[in-house]
Each structure stands twice: as structure tokens, then as C-alpha cells.
Amino acid sequence: MEVFIFLLAALFSVLNPIGTVPIFVGLTQDYTKSERSRVSLWTAINVFIILIISFFIGQYVLKFFGITIPALRIAGGIIIASSGFSLLNGKFNKNKGINKKVEVEIQSRNDIALTPLAMPMLAGPGSISLLIAFYQEHNSTEEIVFSCLAILTVAFLIFIILRSAHYLAKFLGTSGIVAISRIIGFLTIAIGIQYIISSILSIVRGI
């Protein structure tokens, strides 16, 4: 259960679905309620698939390129902390690669569930590296089951949040969403720094 709670909290902080609410509202403002529900569902499904693949297949990618776990954790920690700083500074969209030109192009697309919502807005390098490193340290059958449940729960929360995005935007307002995003950003920075510290300690102990 500790594995479930830790991974759920870490993934939710890194993915930050609350911060995606204003973007989702802007991209789906001309959609019907059923179309918004469909996009929300498929975004959650796409995120789940991306994260599950990263969790189980990522280790083989590391072996192929000869990347060590400490190196991955340091790189992942830097990416995660960088995402956190972007949230605190209000530059999350820019950090995720969503600029004005891309936003205009997105408006004409029929399906936005995979790109840009699922990737790179939600499932990005930070969450992928987090899962790869997490699997290396928690790979017993019980831990894998709880990890998969955590990923499934995060995907379900993403669906609920995006499906309620227009209501959340009205209820919280811009300032409320910014405040929540910055709180999550602070926690995300802490997670990234903890990854870096753990990796450095692991390297020092191995010397």
C-alpha cells in the first residue's frame, strides 16, 4: 500500500492534471458535452498506455543504451524539478512545448486526446523517467500490482478532472488554478531533488 500511495502522489504531482485544465478548456470550448467526455476518456486511456509501456519496457531501453539507474534518476530528477520550477514561474505551457503556433494548429485538429493532451502535456519525460527508475527498485509481484493500480488510478483521476474541467475553471477561476499549480509545482521540485539526492548517495556508497 505504501508503494501505491507514494507512486500515486508522485505521478499526480509530476503529471499535474489540474494545471492542464485551462488548456483543455481552451481547446474544447467549441465542443459539445459528449465530445468533451470522449476527449477526456481517450486522453486518460492514452496516458495510461504510455505510462504502462514506460513502466514495463523502459528497463530494456536502459540496457540497450547502457544507461545506469543512478544516471537515469539524476536526469529524471532534473527534468522533474525543471517542470516544478515551470509551474512555480507560470511557464508550464512553454516548458511542455506548447507555444502559440502549436495552439493555433491544434484548434483545427479533430482529435487532441493523444497530442498534445496525453503527450507531452501530461505524460512527459519526467513521468516516464520516474516510472522507469521506480520499476528498478520495486519489481516484486506485489509491488508491480500496486504500481499498476496507482497508474490506473492516476489515469482515472485525469479523466474525472478533464471531464469536469469547464466546471473547475468556473469554480476555481484563473487565480485558483494558478495557486494549486504552484503548490503542486513546489511538491514536484521536492520530488525531483529527492531523486537527485538519492542517486548521489547511491553513487557515494558504491565508491
Image (tube, helix red, strand yellow):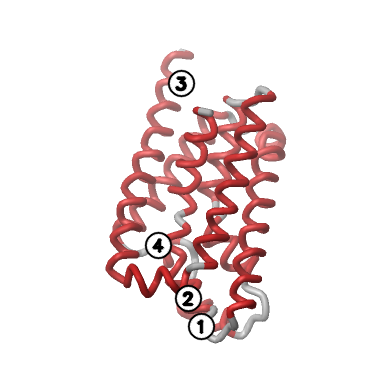
Q: Are marks 2 and 1 in contact (CB under 8 Å)?
A: yes
Query: Which residue is label 3 attached to?
Result: 203
Q: Above or below — where is 149 with respect to 92?
A: above
Residue 92, numbered circle: 4
- The location of residue 36, given as percent across then percent down, is 59, 75
- The location of residue 117, given as percent across then percent down, is 57, 66
Q: Above or below — where is 183 with respect to 108?
A: above
Mark 2 Cα-neighbour bin, 10 Å: few <14, some 14–19, many ≥20: many
Q: Amino acid at mark 4?
A: Phe
Q: Amino acid at mark 1?
A: Gln
Residue 197, numbered circle: none
Numbered disc in front, either 4 or 3: 4
Query: Which residue is label 1 attached to?
Result: 29
Q: Are marks 3 and 1 in contact (CB under 8 Å)?
A: no
* CA distance separating discs 2 and 3: 45 Å
* CA distance separating discs 4 and 3: 32 Å
Residue 25, numbered circle: 2
Q: Earlier in the sequence, mark 2 or mark 3?
A: 2
Q: Amino acid at mark 2?
A: Val
- The location of residue 144, given as percent across then percent down, is 65, 30
